[in-house]
Image (cartoon, grey):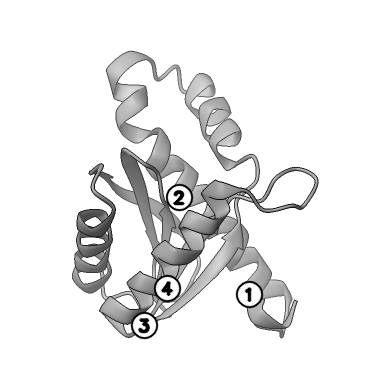
Amino acid sequence: MKIMAVDFGDSRTGIACCDKLEMLASPVCVISEKDFDECIKKTAAEAKKNNADIIVVGYPKNMNNTLGERAEKCVIFAEELKKLTGKTVELWDERSTTVSAHNYLNITNTRGKKRKAVVDAVAATIILESYMGFRKNSNKSVSEI
C-alpha cells in the first residue's frame, strides 16, 4: 500500500512516501506555502501525484502527552485533507521528529540553505518510518490505540 506522510508547518510542509511494499520511506519534497488552504490543496495534489492510498499527518503532541494549538491545527489540516482527497488520513505522533531530522542532517554535514530546504521532508520520512514500523508490528489500526 502506498503511504504518504506529511510534516505540516506554517511555512514549510514536508512530504515523504513509501513504496507499495512498505519497505522504504523516502523524502519527496517540501511545500513552501504559508496560506493554510493553499497548503492543503498542494498536499492533496502531492497525494494524487504519488498515488497515495493512506495519508499520515504528523500530530505534534507535547512531551507530557497534552495537545496544544499546533496539534489542533494539524487535526483541522488532516480533516480538510481527507475531504479533499477522499483518502484515509491518520494522525501520527511526531514528537521529536524535527530534532531527529536535524541530527540526521548533522551526520551528513548538511548545512545552511540546503538544510533548511530538506529538514521538513526528512522529518516527514521519520514520521513515515515510525508509522510503517507500527503497521508491520501490529494488527491494530491507529484509531484502535
Q: CA distance from mark 1 to mark 3?
A: 17 Å
Question: Could you give the CA–CA distance between mark 2 and mark 4, rounded to whole angstroms?
Answer: 18 Å
> Is the Cβ of the residue at disc 2 closer than 8 Å to that at disc 1?
no
Image quadrant in which you'd find residue 115: top left
Label whose residue precedes the other's in the sequence (2 or 1) = 2
Mark pair 4, 1: CA separation: 22 Å
Front: mark 2 or 4: 4
Mark 4 → mark 3, Cα distance in angstroms:
10 Å
Q: Secondary structure at mark 1?
A: helix
Q: Secondary structure at mark 3?
A: loop
- 62 displayed left or right of 81: right
**Residue type (three-letter) at the residue carrying disc 4:** Glu
Residue 79, numbered circle: 4
Q: Is residue 104 left or right of residue 44?
A: right
Residue at mark 2: 124
38 w.r.t. 21: above or below: above
Residue 115 sits above or below residue 141 on the image: above
Which residue was labeled with disc 1? 135
SS for callout 4: helix
Specify the label residue 87 is tagged with: 3
